[in-house]
Each structure stands twice: as structure tokens, then as C-alpha cells.
Image (cartoon, rainbow, N blue to C red):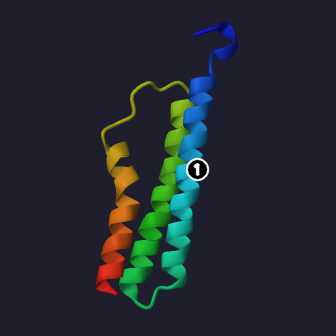
Amino acid sequence: MTTQDRGLQSERTRLAWGRTALACAAVGALLLHGAEGAVGLAAGAVTLLCAVAMVLCGARRYGGVQDLPWWVGVLAVTPGLVAAVALVLR
């Protein structure tokens, strides 16, 4: 790694977390928009909370934390699972 590249990997990681969070927030907003009952509202809320948590994880990773906790992987998968379950139960 050259001195010009120092710190860029962390910045790219933070940007990737931000893009993922934005996509997750869009799914959550669509779930809330189309919610017809408690399941849709809960699914949208959980997905939006995951988006907020993803932004926080990206900021933490940018701050120099090398290893994120185990639950970050679960956090990345949860919105898709919640959306799928909400669509099936709808």
C-alpha cells in the first residue's frame, strides 16, 4: 500500500455500508408504505432500524475498529428475511 492509499480502504468500507443502509431504508419505506396490518408495519420498522444500525456500523468501522461483532452479519441479512416473511404473510 502506498502512502497515497492510506485510509482509503476504511473510507470505501464506510461508503459501502452507507449504500447498503440506503437500499435497506428504501425497502423499509416501501414496506411501511404498503403495510396493511401489524406485520407490514413491524417489518418496515425492523428494516428501517437495521438501516440505522448499518450506518452506525459503517461509522464505527471508519473509526478504526478492525473486527466488528458477530451480529453485524445477522444485521446485513435481517432486512431481506423480514421483507420476505412480510410478503409471504401478506
Residue at image point 54% right, 34% down? 13
Name the residue rendered at 34%, 87% in the picture. Answer: 90
Image coordinates for residue 9, horizontal then vertical, percent: 57, 25
The answer to whether residue 41 is above or below residue 6 is below
The mark tally for this picture is: 1
Location of residue 3 with respect to 80 vertically, above or below: above
User: Which residue carries the number 1 mark?
Assistant: 19
Q: Secondary structure at mark 1?
A: helix
Question: In front: 49, or 23?
Answer: 23
Q: Is residue 89 left or right of residue 67?
A: left
Q: Is residue 51 above or below residue 63?
A: below
Task: Work out which quarter of the rendered image holds the N terminus and state it.
Answer: top right
Residue at 65% x, 16% y is 5
Seen as rendered, the residue at the extreme front is 1
Image position, residue 55 (x, y; %):
55, 48
- The quadrant holding residue 42 is bottom left
Q: Residue at x 40, y 51 (%)?
A: 76
In this view, 55 is above or below 10: below
Residue 26's x, y, as percent?
Answer: 56, 67
Residue most toward the right?
4
Residue located farthest toward the bottom when viewing the structure as drawn? 36
- The type of residue carrying mark 1 is Arg
Give x and y (percent) for residue 19: 58, 50
Left or right of 16 on screen, residue 5: right
**Viewer-side residue, 75 vs 1:** 1
